[in-house]
Image (spheres, helix red, strand yellow):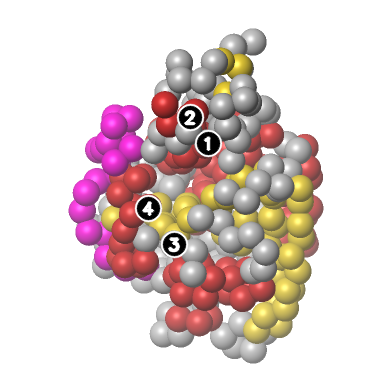
Amino acid sequence: MPLLFTACGKEDPAATTASSPNEPTVAPKPVPKFEPDSAYAYVARQVAFGPRTMNSPAHDATRDWLVEQLNTFGAEVEEQNFNATGPDGTQFRGTNVIGRFKPALRDRILLAAHWDTRYVADSPLEDDPTAVVEGADDGASGVGVLLEIARHLGNDGPEIGVDIVFLDAEDQGASENTESWGLGAQHYARTLSGIKPRYGILLDMVGGKDPRFAIEGVSQHFAPQVVQKVWGLAAQMGYGKYYVNEDGGAVTDDHYFINQMAGIPTIDIINRRKETESGFVLHWHTGDDGMDAIDKVSLGAAGQVVLAVIYREAAGTL
Ligand SMILES: [Zn+2]
């Protein structure tokens, strides 16, 4: 057991400023090691349910499993059900699954990823009309990384509130219609009340090999200070070759609605490619987005940096 209590002023000065002189100071908790194998297993488990398309049995089963996992880790869990209309008029029964760690703390950070998968492999790079999007990278990778982070937070986590939000119905949109994407994020942002997280980090498509987490445009527009924190820390930690200081272009993703509608400065860590017209990975919205598309090194690069953001924010050293 590490030393938890220490006299004022002996440790990191940033950690002592919040305490009154009469209280013992809690030493900041060290950043735990993010386990890529564990995150990979969480991705594989989601894929094993089958495509998580709206209103499908695999979707319902995955939702229940996400709730169960967050409960196991000791979060206060909310299933935020909503109804939404797809671009062709289909009615979706959606659920944002929210796990709150240290729910009483007012100082909070939001971590999010979408857990639904796209109903159609409509990438121009897909020739097979029967191809199905398994969504290992597009959806499950971000959720897998956040589950591994949740496991650490539940296990003697740091003194900061964290809301992990698994957003539904992100990927059911029509390309020309911005509002048809991020339906779960729109519901979350519209109905948010009470304590608002200080800022948010969205993870989407973080599992592809040799990721290029370039600075995404919506993030830079709404949350430049969060971009600076995360990319600066990533460079310090030796992940600069993935978190490149380059313009990644703007993406309509869940963070757009959280920024616009809820006013929470939120960034998107997303693999941006130069070699494709879409700017996304080659397997995006194709039949190739299965477990073969997932690299543990990438999950580790995404997860270890975000985990460090939380622990260092709690310690006042970010
Ligand atoms: Zn997608």
Residue 133 appears left or right of 12? right
Mark 4, secondary structure of its residue: helix
Distance between the alpha carbons at the discs numbered 3 and 1: 24 Å
In magenta segment, residue 308: no
- Closer to us: 207 or 204: 204
- Closer to us: 47 or 222: 222
Of circles 2 and 3, the one toward us is 2
Distance between the alpha carbons at the discs numbered 4 and 3: 8 Å
Name the residue at 71% across, 70% down. Answer: 94
Q: Residue 46, position in %: x, y?
A: 65, 48
Residue 226, label in figure: 4
Distance between the alpha carbons at the discs numbered 2 and 4: 21 Å
Residue 237, label in figure: none
- Closer to us: 203 or 209: 203
Going from N to C along the chain, the mark reached first, 4 or 3, is 4
Of circles 4 and 1, the one toward us is 1
Q: Residue 29, position in %: x, y?
A: 54, 24
The residue where tag 1 is placed is: 18
The residue where tag 2 is placed is: 15
Q: What stretch is highlighted in magenta?
A: 232-251
